Image (tube, grey):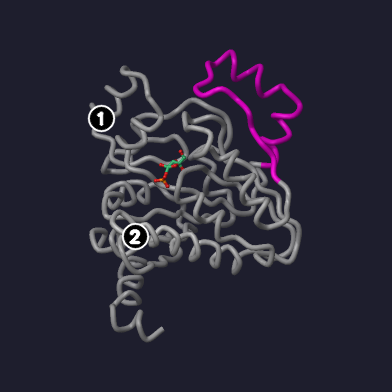
Amino acid sequence: SVMREVTGINEMEKLLHKKLNISKVIIVAGDSDHSPWVKKEIGLAAANCMKTLLRGDNIIAVTGGTTMASVAEMLTPDVADGDLLFVPARGGIGEDVKNQANTICAMMADHTDSKHRVLYVPDEVSEEMYKSIIKDPHISEVLRLIKSADLLVHGIGEAITMAQRRKTSASNMDIIKGAKAVGEAFGYYFNEDGQVVHKVETIGIRLENLSEVPNVIAVAGGSSKSKAIRAYLKKAPPSTILITDEGAAKSLI
Ligand code: F6P
C-alpha cells in the first residue's frame, strides 16, 4: 500500500529478508510493547499468511503464548479449502493453561471449524518417563501427527521473561542466566550466537527436525524481543517466514 511505501516498511522487509537469510519477512506498523493493538495486527498478518500457504487438507503444529493467541483470534473458517487438524508442537513447557499450545490448538480449531488434538504430558519428563510415555497409543498417535505437520506456527520469547513466566527452577534459572540466554522458542533457550544453552525436556518437535517441516511461520514482535528474534533466527530453518512489527524490525536492522 501507499502507506507502507511512505513509512518505509516495504524497504525494511526487503533489508531484513536479505540480512536474516530466511524465506520472507512481514512487518506490521507500530511496536506491540507499547500498543496492544499491534499484537492483533501481527495476528492478522499471520492468519493471512497461513491462508496463502494452505491448500487442501493440512496438519498444523503450533506453540503457545499470547502472540499465538492473537493469531488464533484472527483465524476464520475460510483460511483453507480443505480439512485442518491443529496439534501442539511440543508437550508441557511450563506455561499456564491460557498460554499452552493445547489451548491455542483448541482456539484455532474453534475459529476455523476444524479439529485439534491435545498432548497432556507433564512438564519436564525424565528419561525413563519419556520412554514409557511415548508407548501410550494416544500420545504416540499425536507424535506421529506432529511429525507429519505441513505447517508449523510458533512464537519467540525473550529468554528471562519466558523462564520467569514458566516458574523455572532456581538451578535451571542459573543455567539460563549464566549462559546469557537471550531468546526462547519451543522450550529451547538460545544465546546471542544462536547456540542452545538449555532446553525443557519434553516430547514433540525437536529443533533438529524443524527443517523437515515444509512451512514454518515465526510470529514475534515488540522491541524487547529483537535480540531474541535475532538469536533464534540463527538456528531457524531457511524456509521460515517471520511476522513481526516495526518495533522489533528497527532494532533488527
Ligand atoms: O511457551 C510457548 C511460547 O511460544 C514460547 O516458545 C515463546 O517464547 C512464548 O510462548 C512467546 O509468548 P508471547 O507471545 O506471549 O510473548
Q: Position of residue 41 (x, y in %)?
A: 44, 64
| Quarter of image, ligand 1 | top left
x 67%, y 51%: residue: 110
Q: Which residue is mark 2?
A: 20
| Residue 199 among magenta residues | no
Say the numbered circle drawn on residue 179: 1
Report the amino acid beneath label 1.
Ala
x 36%, y 56%: residue: 221
Residue 241 falls left or right of residue 103: left
Task: Report the quarter where the C terminus lies.
Answer: bottom left
x 26%, y 43%: residue: 192
| Region rendered in magenta | 116-145
The image shows residue 87, relative to residue 221, as above or below, that is above
Q: Residue 160 versus residue 218: which sits nearer the camera? A: 160
What is the secondary structure assignment of the residue under circle 1? loop
The image shows residue 61, relative to residue 51, as above or below, that is above
What is the secondary structure assignment of the residue under circle 2? helix
Q: Residue 227 versus residue 220: which sits nearer the camera? A: 220
Task: Report the quarter where the N terminus lies.
Answer: bottom left
Real-space Cα separation, disc 2 to disc 1, in angstroms = 23 Å
* Classed neighbour count for the residue bearing mark 1: other residues with Cα under 10 Å, few (<14), some (14–19), many (≥20): some
Report the amino acid beneath label 2.
Leu
The single residue placed furthest to the front in the displayed view is 36
Q: Position of residue 124 (x, y in %)?
A: 49, 22
Q: Earlier in the sequence, mark 2 or mark 1?
A: 2
x 69%, y 29%: residue: 139
